[in-house]
Image (cartoon, coloured by chain):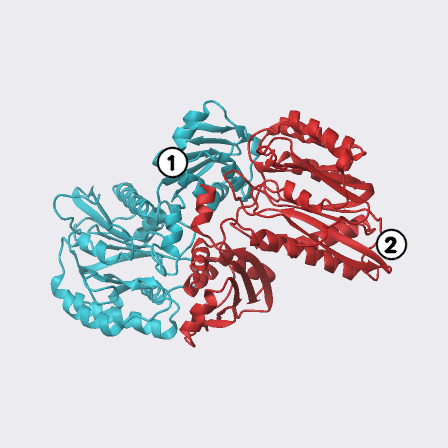
Chain colours: A cyan, B red
Amino acid sequence: MNAASSPPRWPAGFRSVSGCCGIKAADHADLALIASDRPASAAGVFTTNRVQAAPVTLCRERLNRAAPMRAWVVNSGIANACTGAEGREDAECMAAAAAAAAGCTPEEVFVSSTGSIGPRLPVDKIVPALSTLGEGLREDAVRETAQAIMTTDTRPKYGSCTLAVDGRPVTITAVAKGAGMIEPDMATMLAFFATDAAVEPEALNAALRTAVDQSFNRISVDGDRSTNDTVLLLANGAAGNAPLRETHGDWAAFADRLESLSLEMAKAIVGDGEGLSRTVTVAVTGACSRTDADRAARAVANSPLNKTAWAGGRPNWGRVMDALGYSGAEFDPERVTIDYNGCPAVREGRAALDDPDRLKRAAAAPHLDLSIDLGAGSASAVIYTCDLTAEYVRINL
Amino acid sequence: MNAASSPPRWPAGFRSVSGCCGIKAADHADLALIASDRPASAAGVFTTNRVQAAPVTLCRERLNRAAPMRAWVVNSGIANACTGAEGREDAECMAAAAAAAAGCTPEEVFVSSTGSIGPRLPVDKIVPALSTLGEGLREDAVRETAQAIMTTDTRPKYGSCTLAVDGRPVTITAVAKGAGMIEPDMATMLAFFATDAAVEPEALNAALRTAVDQSFNRISVDGDRSTNDTVLLLANGAAGNAPLRETHGDWAAFADRLESLSLEMAKAIVGDGEGLSRTVTVAVTGACSRTDADRAARAVANSPLNKTAWAGGRPNWGRVMDALGYSGAEFDPERVTIDYNGCPAVREGRAALDDPDRLKRAAAAPHLDLSIDLGAGSASAVIYTCDLTAEYVRINL
């Protein structure tokens, strides 16, 4: 997705621009603005952390107005979290400056920040930078925008898909960032989706929630949830279709594409996890309930001892059994089945000693599909994760 | 506690012996037997992991008989976990051989195993080794016993304390092992307490549960709970006191000493945490409930990003705020106070910028006392933990 021959473009009516305001080192983009040339339906999903950054609070409030929105402004390098009333003022100030650049009202602008928790935003640098950015808004600046929102991601993350709605071409384009906390003090995953489809606000919200639940809520790098996590979606209707809702004939296709693109972005975040040497998909089946399946998958995915075993490329299934056992999921240990990349490791809760050498080879592959059947029911869940390396520790010291 | 001039001794009536049965490399002790010369009241606390090793199941059942017990046999190197019905038979076989050596019945013997999950116990080696061990039982073999139950702990863990009950001297002696999972496939924390006090079984059980709750249940190296965790306590009454119960005048002193010794053993385990460079005490106060305080302390203690920041000796309080925020505890972020070794880091949820250099020095000390006041109530909780280093990852690859 990151290697198109011609520069990727936003859906009709959207443009973006990035710039440097000096939060990061010189010549490193740290500011981005994405704007729609017309009012757009908006949906958003935010961190559930009790400690929420000022821009997250601001986005929530603007979304609750249920009014059309026009733009998203984001800075990288400072998270504007744990900054009190001044942090809120700074976020509003940033929205106002972005509104002037985008040609809309401050209330029509979403704000996001990502980076260090604690410091105040240098609005004295951000506001002047934004005042000149408006002129540079371009339809093909997707990649630059994805780059400007990186903290210490090693590569920009963006993607696009098209479908037909009412026989008209519709595009969904996304930019995302996040890699755990690659550099000291850096946090947050952010994703922004734009589409030129016309979508009714309630349906848009439902589609985004479902998509996020199946993608961004299915990934884990280190189990630490940030204060700034934000996913936003704007639908500006420039495609001219009859507004999408659940009863529209093309609704399922739209929701499906949105979910696929979300999953692509979510996997790109895991694939850029800090210091990783191996990605791992933990798939739990045979659980009594979806909640149990989810608990079991997360316990395995977040266990330091499993993560280090994956870094070593070893089929250490005892650690998988151990994590399942304390996950809180209900099951009978003697009915558990575990496969490493399709190779049997555990049958009936004990070593499946079919071919130990084949199992070792399977566990050492660059990507690991870990399939766990609890043998207790019919519910399932998947978590996309990565290993824990000495490099992760060095990065986060 | 580990450097007495004369070899440490068991309480009156207890003796122990260790030996090599060949599970570990040659000449490394991997088998231990502790026996009382008379029947003893017994209490035990075991892992809550749904996947429980065969010896844990056996210990639970023997404890449920509520009959006096005589001995504890333990092997290191193999956990006898995920081994099905054969694993259970192996544990019973080991108990029978230990009973012959200790001069009691098989039902009077507790069994523990620690080491790799999956392989079967080599009972063909364990049984012959036990048959010759009985002759070597000694009153001063505490240290050797602590050594024999180590997997890859870097040092033996044992301790002792005395008090007067009915004016008679009473001793409590403990051996423990555990360091997270220092070597690939190695697991489990074990602790065994012996006292020559006479204690009524129900009171003994209550005292042990309270002691464990305030000590072993307050430590965390990596958040992974093992399939084999076991704490056992035998009280053989050789001191000749009137049996202790809650109404006895010396009860509080006994319970208090037991708790102190438990905490000493628990801290010894954390202090030997795999690859650690710094121990950390996370103390949460001002919580709405004990549960909230516990959740908050555990979230901070188990967060990879906090653990790596501690390894770097950095006062990265944003990561503490982040973990508190997703802990599930109720609090207002703007009322949070955080100190690093007594130095203010956070006041009212924001940076306490009293003296940044002093804060940096405080965070870099060999031990970190992290004090967190949630400002929401009066409940508190403490977790004893350690940092996460690149060495931990290398050890567990």
Mark yes or no: residue A88 visible.
yes
Residue holding disc 1 = A368
Q: Amino acid at mark 1?
A: Leu
The answer to whether mark 1 and mark 2 are in CB contact below 8 A is no
Q: Where in the figure is residue A72, as x and y percent of width and height?
A: 24, 61
Q: How many discs mark residues in the rendered view?
A: 2
Q: Where in the figure is residue B138, as x and y percent of width and height?
A: 76, 42
Q: Please state which of residues A388 and B102 is positioned toward the viewer in this rendering.
A: B102
Q: Quadrant of residue A151?
A: bottom left
Q: In what quadrant of the picture does the C terminus of chain A appear? A: bottom left
Query: Which subunit holds the residue at mark 2?
Result: B
Q: Residue furthest top?
A: A354
Q: Please state which of residues B276 and A153 is positioned toward the viewer in this rendering.
A: B276
Secondary structure state at the residue bearing disc 1: strand
Q: Are tags 1 and 2 found on a single chain?
A: no
Q: Amino acid at mark 2?
A: Asn
